[in-house]
Amino acid sequence: MLKTISLTVNGKPCSGEVEPRTLLAHFLRDTLRLTGTHLGCVVGRCGACTVMWNGTPVKSCMVFAVQASGDEIITVEGLAGDKRLHPLQEAFWKNDAVECGYCTPGMLMSAYGLLQKVNHPTEEQIKKAISGNLCRCTGYRNIVAAIKETADNFKR
Amino acid sequence: MEFPINPPIGDRVKRKETLRFVTGTGRYVDDLLPPGTLHAAFVRSSCAHGRIKSIDVEAARSMPGVHAIFTGKDIAAVLKPLRIGGSSRVRQVKLYPLAVDKVRYFGEPLAVVVADTRYLAEDAIEEVTVDYEMLPAVIDPELALQPGAASVHEEIGSNLVYEYHFATEGIEKIFQEADCVIKERIRSHRITACPIEPRAYLAHYDPQEESLTMWSATANPHSLRTRIADILSLPEGKVRVIAPDVGGSFGVKIQTYQEELLLPYLSAKLERPVKWCETRVEHLRNGRHGRDQIHYIEMALKKDGTMLGIRDKIIADMGSTYTVDHSIMASALYVPGVYQIQNYAVDALGVSTNKTTHGSLRGIGKADASYILERLVDIAARELKLDPVEIRMKNFIPAEAFPYRNATGALYDSGQYHLCLKRVLEMADYEQLRKEQKELRRQGIYRGIGVALVMEPTSSSRIHATGGYASCRMRIEPSGAATVFSSMGEQGQGHETTIAQIVASQTGIPFDKIQVIHGDTLPTPYGFGTGSSRSSVVLMPSAWVAAKKMRDKLLGIAARNLNVVPEKLDIANGKVFAKEDGSRAVEIMEIVRTAYGAIHLLPENMEPGLETTGYFVNPNIDYTPDDKGRMNTFSSYPYAAIVAVVDVDIETGFVKIVRYCTVHDCGNMINPQIVDTQQQGSIVQGIGAALFEELRYDEEGQLLTSTFMDYRLPSVEEVPEIVLDHIITPNPFTPLGAKGAGETGMLGPPPVLCNAVEDALSPLGVKIRETPLSPERILDLIEKGNAPKPTHA
């Protein structure tokens, strides 16, 4: 019982066949082969699969692909411009906010979602925004610093 | 040894690998999907201990998309048993990739389905029915040793699967004559590593070439290759293991797993690529578990706090299909820790139970030892009415005593424990903290101050086990760029960066022109897994050796060209030049062209090309014990001193970490930024272990904590302010002066937070002997108030 869905991913129209039970995360990874979105628990607790869904960060393991039909998705692959890193990516690099890299795409998308809505987030707001994203390597400090630095640069 | 730490060694260089991770272009096993890939799913035991009476796979076999189903019996008929790891002290049992007659832990794989998609494979395993004859579950390791306990492995006849006994002479007399003996039972609870990427494997057998490529989220590719070759009866040259980007390991991916050795067979049999990616539930149930030791420990002291000796009995829960004894061995060897204690006895018992296999986990064994010791020292200080700082300062091994041989023969490379603790006390303003504590107590606030100094033996080497050496091969390519082939894979450690820093420093090849290849057994030289924090102790020195040979070769070619002896030459700015006359110089590119294309200009007897291999042998290691049974199996000894401040809410039992101050010493740092980040993460993992994380089994052996809902990793909101600094005491046994750096952070929180919480609740008579420090436990302890007092000799 396959269903064809069409949606916009990283600004480009895409379509594919899915089962009703196919998770958005699996559709992005297996059908569209956008493998930057990672899976760490598939029960919505680790946040590695976070993507933007119509302007809001969501855990794509908690969304069926059919639910996103006709909608707009941004994944980590959509952050960088034409050969230019997004300021968040630059800041994660500069602040050494990455070790194994597995949680990084989800972490970036949660941070991106925050900065879309709040120009000058406080440290508390930053922590709340990434509280659903688990990182086992870095201890988070450099991640918070990277997001803060990006937000501070927005002010100018 | 000299420490030629020239830039960019020692610089906070931005990591090379980070670029692909921030753009989502890292490549992990689950990202690979060769055409025709089939997907595996495992039928797992629903009980902890039972005989398999029958498995009905017929319904599943006819499910859509299912290609094959194999049970344990099918596999045992075609494959050899697995090779079990560990030393000769471990009692060996016969094990296959799938359980054959009997299941021994909840979640043990007993059949596998291979189907077109992972959804269909998971549908099919639901249709497999297994009939068990239930057996009594062996859960408590102490009860497991009682006569009449059910046997996890009947062929062994007992659940005691490992024993080690050691005693220095005259230990009884020391205890008889001591002013005071502190006796405790302390347990380190069961936890696991939980990298965010679970395990993932993809086996691709090529029937035309009769060769196999295995992509594995492993931290130990070369060792895995040998095991796969063995199980498929292929020569190693026909097996290639590739660990692409690996999303964290923390020890859990260094061992070889049942599923990992089955996939190559499935791919060979079905002649299709076969992939399996573990779910988080499977990871918590089946990934190696760590810690879980009970120590009956006693310390003999003089009234003034001088430590005289330690006696310990360790009961280690090794789970069902135990594979290594590093954990219990490391604990047994390092209980005397950082103190001048030359009288020591230990009886270490490894026990088999119906729990998941015990294995490597960041800080394996050493974390248990330092936790138990640092708790015991605090308990002794309280009993003798000494400040926890005073008792430590009184007994630390002094800086001038290094290299220091401890009671078990371990040879500590270097250290300045007194200085390290002094620094952290200054950083935290310990005097002021104690004053504030008095004031807060008057206000009814239960503030506690914990002190600890934890030491982490790193870079272990044991015969036929891991880490005797590491190697790097390097080539300066005809273009002038360099490629380095590392024998060890990486799972977030940043080797691509640190190796390039070392090579750039030695050869003058710009950092940006150096590429590091790792994790692929085809191009890389042989080496052991990334564990025991050995990268900085053996791998980086091996890169240094390879680069030094390359430097010598470049200087040799330049020497003939310039007619200056190599000793009078140096490298900078893309040139080799005479130190005394910089105008006498030759471009490195010119040397490269000579080495490849104008070999008549090479010095006599020099081989063409620019390729070198460096091996570095783990220094400071004993492979056999002396006549007293003493030996050193780790080669470097980093450590950290910590002061932690907590507030305990006695209404809710909630522990709030107000501040965590630490001073760390891992010798020279190749990239201090990488060390800092790793320490932060390591500390937070330790906070998780101390406060939140616990693998809990019920009496039937069901794991009660098998999702992230009930096995709680620290999120950003649980992370306190961590103040981190370093002192540097170089490791005298390696050319870079570096010690291991990955694990010390994790050792700190369990003892220091227990010490702090016990300090906070001391007015209520609370004694902490079990962890984690969950609110329920704290409330329970407050209610109980008075645990048994230590006994006096």
Image: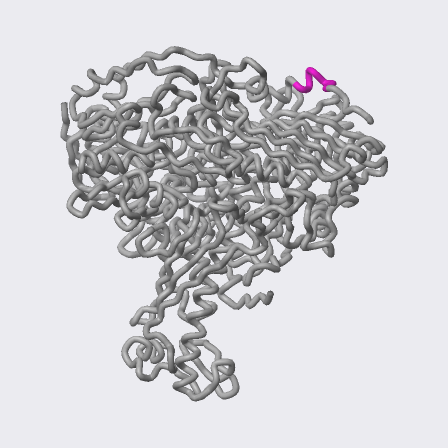
In the picture, which quadrant includes the N terminus of chain B? bottom right
Depth check, front residue: A83 or B709: B709
**Colour option used:** one colour
In the picture, which quadrant includes the C terminus of chain B? top right
Depth check, front residue: B613 or B386: B613
Residue A2 drawn at (x, y percent): 14, 26
* Residue A47 visible, this orientation: yes
Question: What residue is drawn where x is 31% and y is 14%?
Answer: B130
Considering only vertical position in the picture, is B772 above or below B727?
A: above
Q: Quadrant of residue B73?
A: top left
Depth check, front residue: B198 or B367: B367
Residue B705 drawn at (x, y percent): 46, 23
Query: What segment is highlighted magenta in the picture?
Result: B781-787
Left or right side of A37 for B707: right
* Residue B427 visible, this orientation: no
Residue A138 drawn at (x, y percent): 48, 44
Q: Quadrant of residue B702?
A: top left
Residue B105 drawn at (x, y percent): 43, 22
Is-magenta flag for residue B785? yes
Is-magenta flag for residue B360? no
Q: Quadrant of residue B575?
A: bottom left
Left or right side of A92 for B743: right
Considering only vertical position in the picture, is B701 above or below A134?
A: above
